[in-house]
Amino acid sequence: MHLAEMRSLPQALAMLLRVLQAQLSALWLCLAPFSCRLWGALLPGRSPPLLEEGAGEPDGAEVPTVPTSVNYHFTRQCNYRCGFCFHTAKTSFVLPLEEARRGLAMLKEAGMEKINFSGGEPFLQERGEFVGKLVQFCKQELKLPSVSIVSNGSMIRERWFKRYGEYLDILAVSCDSFDEEVNVLIGRGQGNKNHIENLQRLRKWCRDYAVAFKLNSVINRFNVDEDMNEQIKALNPVRWKVFQCLLIEGENTGEDALREADKFIISDEDFERFLDHHREVSCLVPESNQKMRDSYLILDEYMRFLNCRNGRKEPSKSILDVGVEHAIKFSGFDEKMFLNRGGKYVWSKADMKLEW
């Protein structure tokens, strides 16, 4: 064994230990309720040892967070003006391609399994070539199990699928209404482009080029009473993510915000009513404000983790400057909520039983 390989061995073992710790932690979160019930039945009145204060960890021990699933908002620029947007165009900065690749490789080394590219609108930068090169790098070079994109879909062309479709596991398209007038009212539109017609076209291309199709909808005051059952079933996405409209200070509410989303907000009761009306849609994945706020690992355009625990986005230092393990400590990430909201699922198209 070469000297350089011997020096890197402890680092590799430490990384493997962190990944195993995260997986065991996730397993415990799933099994804990059942083990507690069993303990209570056998020894009523006594707490399970692992739930007693301080049990299960050495004094002062801190298990590093593993960035299993990361959302990289590499641009804030967008061609739409959705009134409730919570990641607005406060800068025009985009990292050089090689720096973005370096950061992604660091995340893979730290245990990342899934990367989601978002914005802004990811296909604005170099008309989709930038995100296409990142998608190809993550699948071909980093060999990530899952690579996905969230887009409004307005700038995607079939030639992009021909060139990069094989490297993309999931394309999530944002659509909040099947009434074009409502989409225009919300701000999800541009000129004479019909958002619904484009959505149908993208659904066909995903099928033609073997990309899993996902749908994202933000439920707000203008669509909360809409019946989307038939349209969703016809599109047949692998997942329909249904978000409750969320306020983020400095983004879509407050003095320094670029959007005013207060008029879009709905109550928890209204959100539950929408979910109940669509309860027969099997692919529906609901996300209330409580589930959304701290359950995502979000990287901004500088590759800084964004902590949303105080109702606004507070950035860490960039992983490019201080490394993943240090920066992620300031992410505010709630791994338990991530698992509870269904953040871990079958996310590689190779494992999906889909009829293309």
Image: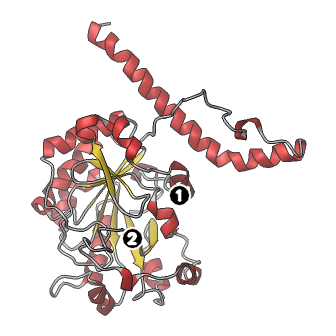
Residue type (three-letter) at the residue carrying disc 1: Gly
In the image, residue 214 above or below residue 320: below
In the image, residue 122 above or below residue 244: above
- Residue 240 on image: x %, y %: 45, 70
Residue at image mark 2: 215
Quadrant in the picture for residue 203: bottom left
Res. 141 visible in picture: no
Between 202 and 89, which is closer to the camera in this rendering?
A: 89
Residue type (three-letter) at the residue carrying disc 2: Leu
- SS of the residue under disc 1: loop
Would residue 294 appear left or right of 95 to someone viewing this image?
A: right
Residue at image mark 1: 342
How many discs mark residues in the rendered view?
2
Would residue 263 appear left or right of 278 to someone viewing this image?
A: left
The residue furthest bottom is: 181
Between 147 and 96, which is closer to the camera in this rendering?
A: 96
Of badges 1 and 2, nearer the viewer stands 1
- Residue 180 on image: x %, y %: 30, 89
Q: How is the image coloured?
A: secondary structure
Would residue 286 appear left or right of 85 to someone viewing this image?
A: right
- Residue 282 on image: x %, y %: 55, 71
